[in-house]
Amino acid sequence: MTSHDPATMLAIGDFAARAGVTTSAMRYYESLDLIRSMRTGGNQRRYRRAELRRVAFIRAARSIGLSLDEIKETLDRLPDKRIPDRADWQRLSAEWSRRIDDRIAHLRGLQEDLDGCIGCGCLSIDKCTIYNREDALAEEGAGPVRGFKPL
Ligand code: FES
């Protein structure tokens, strides 16, 4: 038997229980091509056990606030013709660490801006970096632009 043998694959209910997600979440992830199934002759979904790692990755990524688009972009870099191995997942993990660092830096910036806004409350569309962070700063150039000035 191979890992593609339907007899070794999991039905959606069994897979969802092992993955810790609902069957509706499974169908949704599949509709976004985040996970893949095969169909039996009776058109029932069957999942390779290797897909469990993809669901675990999705859940972990969601827990740190990555969007499903970001997750898909990452998962799309896994090999398509074979089951991803440890090195493949470690490569994604390294990239993930950089994203987490970026997110932490972004949140720290927001926290500093929020500190400046406490007590102000103006929510000025021109001046407040919390209220209108991206639009107001877009004219100052590409990339992160900071420079909150208290009123
Ligand atoms: S509330 Fe943010 S600058 Fe006033």
Image: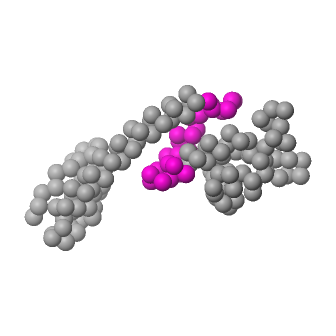
Is residue 67 visible in the rendered image? The answer is no
Query: Which residue is at the far top?
Result: 87
Query: Which residue is at the far front?
Result: 18
**86 lies above or below 109:** above
Q: Is residue 118 left or right of residue 143?
A: left
Name the residue: 50% across, 53% down. Answer: 62
Residue 136 or residue 13, whichever sits in front: 13
Q: In this view, does 79 lie to the left or right of 138?
A: right
Colour convention: one colour
The magenta region covers 59-85
Residue 14 or residue 121, whichever sits in front: 14
Name the residue: 36% across, 48% down. Answer: 103
Residue 14 or residue 149, whichever sits in front: 14
Q: Is residue 146 left or right of residue 104?
A: left
Q: Position of residue 102 (x, y in %)?
A: 35, 43
Is residue 24 visible in the rendered image? The answer is yes
